[in-house]
Amino acid sequence: MSDINQQVLLAARPNGAPKDSDFKLVEAPIPKPGPGEMLLRTIYLSLDPYMRLRMGEKSHLPAFEIGKPLAGATASLVVESNLPDYKPGDFVVSLHGWSTFALSDGKGMFGRPLAKLDPKRAPLSAAIWVMGSPGLTAYKGLLEIGKPKEG
């Protein structure tokens, strides 16, 4: 395992299409999990359209902070764990985002436990694509907005 944690920070709010200069790649030490934490290694990162809105200041979600890592859904590997429900080698869905490694307290959205993934049942990427925000948005749009009908 590499001893470097790469992170992508938001360097500036994009004006129009994002440019390389709107982001900054930094290297930092891999964080060490403390009590009640686990260390996750990103396997897949979901880059979703709503993220562009969060790079600006107008979104239904809080704007990304300048100088901080951008956030997004990930399929991640548990590397180290001080949590009884998660063991090294487990795979989970997390929202830590644009970094190689991140610490987690095991809680996801609304304080719910992070969902474990079974790579024997489906590819890890399915959790953040087909079954993640992009897939569920498309499914809801098709059924509730498109309202398909026979013929």
Image (cartoon, rainbow, N blue to C red):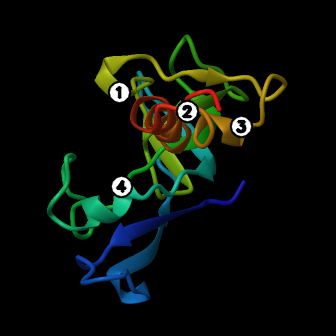
Residue in front for this viewpoint, 18 or 27: 18
Neighbourhood count class around disc 2 (C-alpha, 10 Å): few under 14, some 14–19, many 20 upward: many
The residue at 21%/68% (across/down) is 56
Please state which amino acid type lies under the numbered disc 3.
Leu
Instruction: Choose the circle earlier in sequence order: 1 or 2.
Output: 2
| Helix, strand or loop at mark 2 | strand
| Crowd tier of the residue under label 1, counting other residues whose Cα lies within 10 Å: few below 14, some 14–19, many 20 or above | few
Quadrant hosting residue 2: bottom right
| Mark nearer the N terminus (1 vs 4) | 4
Task: Quote the CA–CA distance across marks 2 and 4.
Answer: 18 Å
Q: Nearer the viewer, mark 4 or mark 3?
A: 4
Tell me the tag on residue 109: 1
Image coordinates for residue 28, horizontal then vertical, percent = 46, 65
Which residue position is annotated with label 3? 124
Residue appearing at x 62%, y 59% in the figure: 3
Vertical placement of residue 150 versus 33, above or below: above
Answer whether labels 2 and 4 touch (C-beta < 8 Å): no
| In the displayed structure image, the side of residue 118 where residue 22 appears, left or right | left
Q: What residue did someone put label 2 on?
A: 93
Cα–Cα gap, marks 4 and 3: 22 Å
